[in-house]
Amino acid sequence: MDLEESGRQIGEKLFILLSTRQKKELAQFVLDYKIGDIQTDILYAAFLQENQKTHGQSLTEIREGDLYFCLEQRLVTVRNQVIPLTVKEFKIFSLLIQHPRRVYSYEVILDLVWQEDYSYYSRKAVNNHISNLRRKIKIAPDVPDYVKSVYGIGYKFEI
C-alpha cells in the first residue's frame, strides 16, 4: 500500500481482502446503522459490485411462497407483482423479514428504522406504517398475513 493513496483507494484494497462472510457482515452493518451517508453508500456500492463480480448473485434474497424480497434491489413482490413501499415501510419490512419469528417492540422498531430519539414519535407511527405495509402486501384474500402483531409488544414476520 502506498501511503500517498487516498483513503478510498486504501479502503477498496482492504475491502478486497475481506472474506465473503466479512463483506456480508460489513454490508449489513452499513445498512443497519449508516443509511444515507455518502461514504457508506460508496462502501455499500463497492460491496455490491465486488459481490456481483465474484458471485454473480444478490446478497440478500428471501423467498417465502409467493413472496420475494431483495434487499439490494429494494424490491418486494407478491405473485410476481411489484409492491411499491415507502422508505420506512421497506425498512420495517426488511428488519422483520431478515429476522423471522423475532418479536420487535415498538421502541426497537422506532430506534432501528427512524434512527432518532423515539420519544418524538408514538406507537401510532409504527402502527400506521405496519398497517400500510400489510395492506400493500395483501394483494389477494388468500395471500398470508406475513407481518403478525404480538399484542402489547410489537411485530414479527411469520408465515
Image: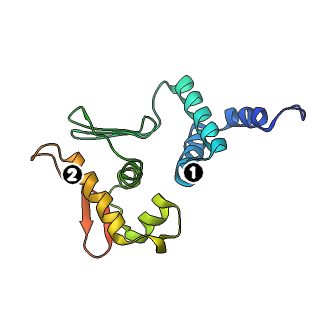
Residue 26 in the image: state x and y as whole percent: 60, 46
Q: Are marks 2 and 1 in contact (CB under 8 Å)?
A: no
At x 44%, y 67%, the residue is 108
At x 62%, y 32%, the residue is 46
- Say few, some or many: other residues with alpha carbon within 10 Å of mark 1 (under 14 / 14 to 19 / 20 or more): some
Residue 4 in the image: state x and y as whole percent: 90, 32
Please, what secondary structure does the residue beneath circle 2 have? helix
Q: Is residue 13 left or right of residue 31?
A: right
Residue 125 is drawn in which quadrant?
Answer: bottom left
**Amino acid at circle 2:** Arg
Residue 18 in the image: state x and y as whole percent: 66, 38
Q: Is residue 137 left or right of residue 86?
A: left
Earlier in the chain: of badge 2 and badge 1, it is: 1
At x 18%, y 47%, the residue is 138
Q: Which mark is residue 29?
A: 1
Compared to residue 68, the image places residue 98 above or below, namely below
At x 20%, y 35%, the residue is 79
Considering depth in this image, is 39 or 51 the residue closer to the camera?
39
Q: Is residue 144 visible?
A: yes
Q: Which residue is mark 2?
A: 135
Q: CA distance from mark 2 to mark 1?
A: 29 Å
Please, what secondary structure does the residue beneath circle 1 have? helix
**Amino acid at circle 1:** Phe
Tag count in the figure? 2
Considering depth in this image, is 101 or 126 the residue closer to the camera?
126
Compared to residue 74, the image places residue 53 above or below, namely above
Q: Check the image and name the residue furthest to the left.
A: 141
Q: Is residue 159 visible?
A: no
Q: Nearer the viewer, mark 2 or mark 1?
A: 2
Q: Check the image and name the residue furthest to the front.
A: 120
Residue 28 in the image: state x and y as whole percent: 53, 47
Residue 24 is drawn in which quadrant?
Answer: top right
